[in-house]
Image (cartoon, rainbow, N blue to C red):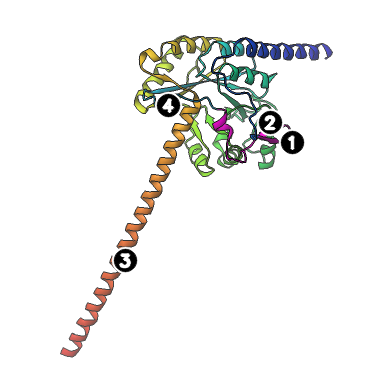
Amino acid sequence: GEDGHDAVGELIEATVDAAHTATANFVAPDMLAPAPADGLTEPGEFGPLPTVSMDGHTSRETYARPAAPGDIRPQIALIISGLGRSRDVSEDAVRRLPRNVTLAFSPYAPGLQNWIDAARATGHEVILELPMEPFDYPANDPGPHTLLANGSPEENARRLDYLMSRATGYFAVMNRMGARFTAVDSATQAVLHRVASRGVGFIYDGAAPRPQLANAADAVDLSLAAADRLIDARLERDHLDEQLLHLEALAIQNGDALGVGQAYPLTVELVNTWASALERRGFALVPASAILERRAAHTHERLVAEAEAASSRHDRAVTYATVRASFGRHDEEEEDSDGGDHGGGH
C-alpha cells in the first residue's frame, strides 16, 4: 500500500544518509581511491559492468586493499558478509572493524554504492555477493535475481549482469547461499567464466565442500579462493571463539587462513576484539584479496609443475618407446640372422 511504500522510501533514505555520514566522518588516513577507476567499467543492459581496461588493469587488482609486502607471519583474512541489509550492523562494521577486514555487501542493499564508498573511504576493500540457489529454493529464496542451477545460460547471464551492475568498487564476488547451484558443474562454470572475463575474483564461502570449483576456476583462468571456516554457523560466543582459534591453527599449518562471518552484532563485536590482539600473538591480519592472490599464485605454480611433470613423463615415454623400438629392430635382426643360419644347416 501507499503507507508501506512511504516506509520503504524512508528506510532507503535513512540508509543512504547513514552511509554518507560514515563516509564524511570516518575517513581513514589510508582510504582507498574512489570507484569507478578509469577504464574499468562498460555500459551494460542494467547499468555499468566491470571490464578489463585497455591496458590490462582489472577490478581484482585495482580495488583490492594493498597488503604489507614481505610479511612472513602466518596470515589470516576475515570477510564479514551480508552487509547493507541492516543499517546499524553495517555502519558498525564500516566504522569499527580493522581496515584489513574485508566487507561483503548484498546486491539488494538500499544505497549500495554509498555503502561501498563508505567502506572504501575507511580503508576496507569490498566484495559483492551473488545470490545462488540453495537446495530448499524457493522456500529459502536469496532474492529475485538468484542464479539458478537449472536456469538457461542466457537467463543466468542476464541475472549475473544485473547483479554485477548494482555498484562499482568491488574486487571480487562471493556466493550467497548456493549449495544446489555450486553442485551443478555446467551452471557454475558458465558463471565463473563470465566473472573471469570481467576481471573480477571469486571467493567461495566454504559452506559445503566443492572441490570441483577449483577445477572450474582453473579452466577459465579465474582467481578463486575458498574460505576455510564459517565462523558463526552457530551464533554462540564459545563457537565463534573456537572457530577463530581454528583459523589461527590453520594459518600456522598452511601459512594462511580465510574465514567468513555474517553481519551479526555478536560477530562484529567478537571479530573486533579478537583482531585487536592478533598481532601480539604473532599473526598478520590481511585483506581477503591477499589470500586470493597468494592461493592463485600457488595454483599457478602447481599447474606449471603439473604441466612440466606431464611433459617430462611424455619425454620419458618417447625415449622409452624409441629405445624399445631400437631393441625391437635389433631383436628382429638377430631373428633374421638366426633364421638364416638354421636354414643353411638344414
Would residue 62 be counted in the magenta stretch? yes
Q: Earlier in the sequence, mark 1 or mark 2?
A: 1
Residue numbers of the magenta segment: 41-63
Q: Secondary structure at mark 1?
A: loop
Q: Nearer the viewer, mark 2 or mark 4?
A: 4
Instruction: Give yes or no for contact between labels 1 and 2 (Cβ–Cβ under 8 Å).
Output: yes
Gap between marks 1 and 3, in whole Å?
Answer: 59 Å
Instruction: Give yes or no for contact between labels 3 and 2 (Cβ–Cβ under 8 Å).
Output: no
From the image, which quarter does the C terminus lie in? bottom left
Residue identifier under label 4: 69
Q: Is residue 91 visible?
A: yes
Residue identifier under label 3: 322
Looking at the picture, which amino acid does disc 4 mark? Pro
Work out whether residue 93 or residue 52 is closer to the camera in this orientation and state it: 52
Looking at the picture, which amino acid does disc 1 mark? Glu
Q: Which x, y percent locates residue 235?
A: 51, 13
Residue identifier under label 2: 165
Q: Which x, y percent locates residue 145?
A: 69, 30
Left-right relation of 258 to 192:
left
The residue shown at (55%, 32%) is: 60
Q: Earlier in the sequence, mark 4 or mark 1?
A: 1
Looking at the picture, which amino acid does disc 2 mark? Ser
Gap between marks 3 and 2, in whole Å?
Answer: 58 Å
